[in-house]
Image (tube, rainbow, N blue to C red):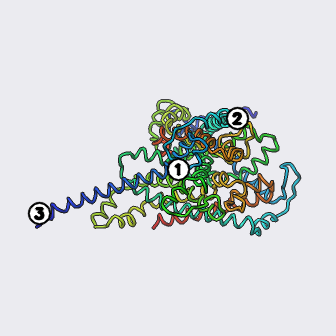
Amino acid sequence: MSTTEVRVTATARDSARPPRGRAPRTVEQANRRLKWAMLTPALAFVGLMIVFPLAFTINLSLTDAFGAVNADKHHVGLRNFVDALSDVRRFWPAVKRTVVFTIGAVALEMVLGLALAMLMRKPFRGMRWVRTILIIPLLTTPVAIGILWLLILDPTNGVANHLLASVGLPRMEFLGSVSQSLPTLMLIDVWQWTPMVTLLLLAGLTTLPEEPEEAALVDGANAWQRFRHVVLPMLGPTIGTALVLRAVDALKTFDILYATKGPGGGSDFEAETLNVYAYGLTFDYQEYGLAAAVLVLFTLFIVGVVVLLRRRSGRKDAA
Amino acid sequence: MTASHATAAPRGRTGRRRGLAWLRAAAITVVTLIFALPVVWMFAAAFKTNVQVTDPRVGLWFSPTLENFRNIVEDGQILRSMGNSLLVGVVSTVLSAVIAVPAAWAVGRFRMHRTGSLVLVARIVPAISLLVPWYYLFAQIGLVGSYTVLILSQMFVSVPLITWIMISFFAGLPVELEEAGRTDGLSAFGAFWRITLPLAAPGTATASLLAFVFSWNNFMFALVFADDRTQTVPVALFNFISYASTDWGGLMAAATLITVPVVVAAVVGQKHLVAGLTSGASKG
């Protein structure tokens, strides 16, 4: 009985459809089936590795998990969030450092990156070598970069102070001092990531049409006016993309901070951003519940920044 | 009057233009040196004695020694960790490409950008907020310290990266070739396998190379999940700072050793890597 039913539906479906292979309707159906088959492994992976862990983190943030990972834990409501948000000794300074580091480093990178991209816009001899050199900082292992700068910026034996002295400038403590650590780390970030902004903007510049600029030239606009009123608006979407990318990555910076300043961002937590703080809470102090709460806040913060930046750059597109 | 003006103006302009071109060349040279010199300094320091490394007056002219390299090779930890990084990088990249390339094809070929942007979530969410639950779960099943966890966690970075680069690659391929294959009797999968995939080989190579480099560089996952036996290069280097804080020569030799493959990749694949980095980013 059931077998016949299955057979009937099968034949009905077969006859409703042209024979396998060539007819366009089948191609479309085959495509539809195939595209979901091709997507499923990746979507399943993303779901398993991201959605599920995030749900787990949210759940963990509502418990008093501490110490061993298989220790008993109890739900404590929003206590971890209250504890984090009322912590003016570690949490809020870390938020402030994260914001200062991100805004400072990314702003410099955008300005320098744009200037460099404009400088390199017209092809020149040796362009290939310059581009090769530019991608080396952003492909190099961050821990190696951190160690390299520790050597260069060493307060007593570093070559940076030697150079400063040779032009008559005072010696600097750089990463050796509490007050200069964060600005120095921002400059290292600028050294490492300005090339990325430059390469992105160069790619954007090559796709721009030439006519608007030629028209402005004919109208007598000088170089600065052409840049300000023609190139810059057309480059808006690319600048927006570069800004979002850099902001997201700068907010999450960890490797260089940890490699140069160690756990807690140094003796006075001077380089402790939210990322370093959350890492320490989890893996040095095993405060899993509190750490999870900080991570939920951190994630919301980053998502908020992305939404804000995308909306703003979207408005720029329209203008 | 008009004639003399006409002849004078161009000469003045070309003179100024030549001056500007010279200024531009100088500016580009200075900037390039700023980005290149620190890395050159690292390579140079690897061949200096410990006394020379910490003497800033010793510039780039000195008689090089291989002593630092001999020491770290004898110690063995850096070479072992390079082996670990190679293993984790290759396996995670291959597995990621196997699941990411078909997904990117589906998104790029059928313009499913909403579905594709799900992958973007993985770029935004801070890795550490996933690391905590992974650690929690993997510690309970006793997997922390294993290659499996290192490979799985690395795939979290590689799958979105490869997908993102390949979406724009597939979107740029003409659909007609695939359709021609279909009319010649290939199945939907057959057309993808026999026609589109071979065309996508260069893009896949670029994306995979980038994924491998990011795996080679990844510090945080390895810091949490690797043990002494499975530690990868960034962790081995980091441990080296705390254990041998005065051995600058050894540190620079180790840093050089792990940077050389990256520099080689940059020189060989310069054009493709830039294209990959920017296409992976420009749709963000």
Q: Nearer the viewer, residue A258 or B243?
A: B243
In the rendered structure, the answer to whether residue B247 lies left or right of residue B192 reads right
- Looking at the rendered image, the disc whose residue lies closer to the viewer, 2 or 1, is 1
Q: Is residue A49 visible?
A: yes
**Which three-letter amino acid code belongs to the residue tagged 3?**
Ala
Image quarter (top left, top right, bottom left or bottom right) of the N terminus of chain A: top right
Asked if disc 3 and disc 1 are in contact, CB closer than 8 Å, the reply is no
- State the image quarter where residue A44 is shown: top right
In-image side of B24 versus A37 (left or right): left
What is the x, y in percent for residue A288?
Answer: 80, 55
Contact check, label 2 and label 1, Cβ < 8 Å: no
Q: Amino acid at mark 1?
A: Arg
Subunit ID for the residue under disc 3: B
Q: Chain of mark 1?
A: B
Q: Nearer the viewer, residue A182 or A281?
A: A182
Quarter of the image with the C terminus of chain A is bottom left
Between marks 2 and 1, how big is the CA–CA gap? 86 Å
Residue at point 79% right, 48% down? B136
The picture places residue B50, in percent across and down from the top left corner, at: 61, 43
Residue under pointer 2: A6
Q: Residue at x 66, y 51 (%)?
A: A259
Question: For this view, does B248 lie left or right of residue A238?
Answer: right
For residue B57, the mark is 1
Residue A46: x %, y % from top left: 66, 47
Residue that label 3 marks? B3
Image location of residue A277, percent across then percent down: 72, 58
